[in-house]
Image (tube, rainbow, N blue to C red):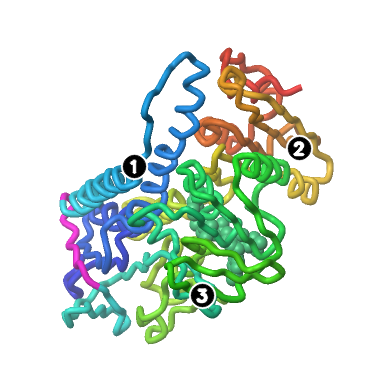
Amino acid sequence: MADEYDYDLFTIGAGSGGVRASRVAAAHGAKVAVAEEYRVGGTCVIRGCVPKKMLVYGAHFAEDLVDAQHFGWTIEGKRFDWAALRDHVQNDVTRLEGLYGQTLGNHNVTIFAERAMITGPHEITLASGKTVTAKYILVATGARPLVPEFPGSEHVITSNEAFHLEALPRRILIAGGGYIANEFAGIFNEFGCKVTIANRSDTILRSYDASLRDRLLQISMVKGIGFLFNTEFESIEKQDDGSLLVKLTGQDPCEYDAVMVATGRVPNTEGLGLETVGVELGKKGEIVVDAFSKTSVDHIYAVGDVTDRVQLTPVAIREGQAFADSVFGPGETYAVDHSCVPSAVFSHPPIAAVGMTESEARNSLGNIKVYQSDFRPMKNVVAGRNERSLYKMIVDAANDRIVGIHMIGPEAPEIMQAAAIAVKAKLTKADFDATVAIHPTMAEELVLFK
Ligand code: NDP
C-alpha cells in the first residue's frame, strides 16, 4: 500500500491498544511503525494492571499465612521482604516488555524508541529529528495520573512510583476513592503499613453498586484502613526527618511517610501536534472519536485511554483490533460494543461487576427484582475470619432478563468473567436456575438465588 507514504500506519504509543492495532494491521499486510517514548507495553504492562496484580497476590499472603494456622499449618519465622517482591515483579515486567517488543518485531513492525509528534497531515517527526510519512496515524498515547495542584504537591507519589519504592512507608495517605486508591490501600495495608484513604466526596468507587461499596468500606475499616471523607488537600510540608506534614480541609494536621495521589487520570494529548492538524479534543483534553475510533480528521484514529471512553485495557485492545481490522482487513468496518463491560477492583477482598447497578436499573427500568446472597465463604469460616461475601443479581421484572451481577468476595473477578457472558448474552434468571450448582463453591450462589 505504502508507495506514496513511508508507512501505511504510524502508531504513537505502544501500550495495549497501540500494540494490538499495529500487530493486527501488519498481519493484514500493512507497513507499520510505532513510536514509544517510554517502555513497550504501556501502562497496563509496565505500571498498571499487571505489576499491580502481582502485588495483590504478594499482599494476600499476609492473610493466607495467618489463616493457614487454622488449617493446621505452623509457619515459623515468616517475614516479608518488600525489595524481593518489588524486584521479582520488575523482572517479570521486563520479561513481558521484551515479549511485546518481540511480537511487534515478528510482525515486521518498526519500533522507534522515542517520542513522536504529528507535524503535518500525514507527517510525523521523531525526537531525533527524523521525519516520516504515513497514510494513517493512530494515536494511542494513554493517560497519566492527575495530580491536583496545592502547596507541597511536589512531595506526592502516584501509582507510577509506588512500584519502585525503596522501602515501604510506615504511614501512607492515599488520596482518591476509586480503583487505584482502594487497590493500593489493600496492598499496603496487607504489607503492614498504616493506610489512610482521603477522598473529596463521601463515596468510594462511585460507579459500583452501593451495597458492594458499603461492604468493602466496612471490611477495609475492620482490616485497619482509615477513611477521611469530604476533604481536600490544603498543603503538604516536608519535615526535617523526611516525614510529610499533611493538612487536609476539616482535619487536624497529620504526619505520614508517603502520600500517594490516585484521583483519576488525564489523557496524554499535549505536545503531539494534534492542534496543528485539527484533531478535536474534548473538555478533559481527550481525543473525540466516533464509534469507529476515527477522530475529526479522516485518516487519524485514536484508541484506548487517550479517548477517555472506558479506561480499561481489554477495551483498548478491542478498539485497536477493530480499528486495524476495519481499516486494513478484508472484512466490513465494525465498531466496538462498549455496553455491558465487566470490571473488577482488586481490593481485599475484590469486587467484580457487570451491567447495571440496582439504582441504575431502578431508574432506567422501573420494575426490577433484586436477588441477594450474603454469606461467609467456607474458607473464611474455617479460618475464623469474620468476612462475608455479597452477591447481587438484578433482573428486569418485565422479561426475567439479568441486567446486572455484582459480587464482593474471594475470587469474585475470576467468577465474574464467566457470569458476564451470560449477562452479555441476555440470559434470564430462569436460565441460571436451570443450571445445576457445583458444590461446594462460592460461585454456586449465582444459581441458587431465591
Ligand atoms: P477513579 O476514576 O477510579 O477514581 C478517582 C477518584 O479520585 C474518585 O474517588 C474521585 O472522587 C477522586 N477525584 C477525581 N478528581 C479529583 C480531583 N480533581 N481532586 C480530588 N479528587 C478527585 O480513578 P483512579 O485514579 O483510581 O483510576 C483511573 C482509572 O484507571 C479508573 O477509572 C479505571 O478506569 C482505571 N483502572 C482500572 C483498574 C481495574 O480495572 N481494576 C485498576 C486501576 C485503574 P469522587 O468519586 O468522590 O468524585
Horizontally, is 151 left or right of 130 in the view? right
Q: Which residue is mark 3?
A: 237
Q: Which label lies toward us, 3 or 2? A: 3
Residue 135, by quadrant, is: bottom left
- The span from disc 3 to disc 1 (Cα, nearest Å) is 29 Å
Label 1: which secondary element: loop
Horizontally, is 96 left or right of 380 in the view? left
Label 2: which secondary element: strand
Residue 401, by quadrant, is: top right
Foreground residue, 29 or 63?
A: 63
**Is-magenta flag for residue 40?**
no
Q: Which residues are magenta?
A: 106-114
Outermost residue toward the front? 241
Foreground residue, 112 or 169?
A: 169
**Residue 271 percent coordinates (x, y):** 36, 81
Q: Earlier in the sequence, mark 3 or mark 2?
A: 3
Foreground residue, 160 or 250?
A: 250
Tell me the amino acid under the disc marked 1.
Asp
- The span from disc 2 to disc 1 (Cα, nearest Å) is 50 Å
Tell me the amino acid under the disc marked 2.
Asp
Whether disc 2's CB lies below 8 Å from ligand 1 is answered no
Q: Residue at x 69, y 34 (%)?
A: 392
Q: Which residue is mark 2?
A: 396
